Amino acid sequence: MKITKTRLKAIIKEEVQNLKEDKSAKTTEKMRADFERTGKLPPHLQQLVKLMNKHKSKITNIIVPGLEWMADIKENKQKLKEKKIPKKSDPPAWHQHKIAVDTVKNPMKAMLGDVTVEEYEEILRDKFGYNDKDIAKLKR
């Protein structure tokens, strides 16, 4: 039996109403503080997530009574750049990546050519999807 989006929304709404939750302001503040500290959802929201996963739902913007503050949390919709480490089957890109990584790891190698360490860091960021954290790891 296929469940339509409308029916699934009704099921989830019903389940949300059935969730036993203490809606006092103090409890809500405590749940929010715990969420911000640990990043872990409260138990009743974990139940809701399980329900949505069970139905393989892509429904968003569900507001649980007493937890309206969670609607203010902006989801990161931008896809993080993945590292694009080239394969050896693409020799020019593979060599450029290897030289850039080696130069960032050992800045003395920058003296051998015309490109500076900063320029290699830019190449790693722009062309190969590295972020500042990845570059910092290379420098250690």
Image (cartoon, rainbow, N blue to C red):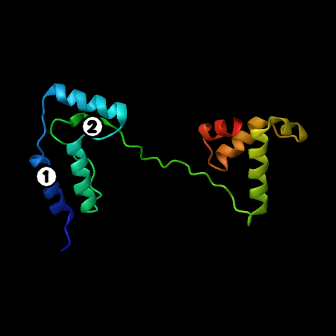
Place of residue 48 in the rendered image (x, y in percent of width and height, measured from the top left) = 22, 50
Q: Quadrant of the N terminus?
A: bottom left
Residue positioned 10% across, 53% down in the render = 14
Q: Secondary structure at mark 2?
A: helix
Place of residue 21 in the rendered image (x, y in percent of width and height, measured from the top left) = 13, 39
Place of residue 7 in the rendered image (x, y in percent of width and height, measured from the top left) = 15, 62
Residue positioned 70% across, 62% down in the render = 87
Q: Quadrant of the C terminus?
A: top right
Q: Label 2, on which residue?
A: 70
- Depth check, mark 2 against mark 1: the one in front is 1
Q: Is residue 81 left or right of residue 58?
A: right
Whether 87 is drawn above or below 104: the answer is: below
The amino acid sitting under disc 2 is Met
Q: Residue furthest bottom?
A: 1
Place of residue 34 in the rendered image (x, y in percent of width and height, measured from the top left) = 30, 31
The amino acid sitting under disc 1 is Glu
Using the numbered discs, state the Cα–Cα distance from disc 2 to disc 1 in whole angstroms. 18 Å
Q: Is residue 89 left or right of residue 64?
A: right
Quadrant position of residue 95: bottom right
Q: Label 1, on which residue?
A: 15
Residue positioned 14% across, 48% down in the render = 16
Please tell me how many numbered marks the rendered image carries. 2
Q: Is residue 43 left or right of residue 15?
A: right
Badge 2: residue crowd in 10 Å (few <14, some 14–19, many ≥20): some
Residue positioned 46% across, 47% down in the render = 78
Quadrant position of residue 135: top right
The numbered mark, 2 or 1, whose residue comes first in the sequence reads 1
Whether 138 is drawn above or below 55: the answer is: above
Q: Are marks 2 and 1 in contact (CB under 8 Å)?
A: no
Quadrant position of residue 41: top left
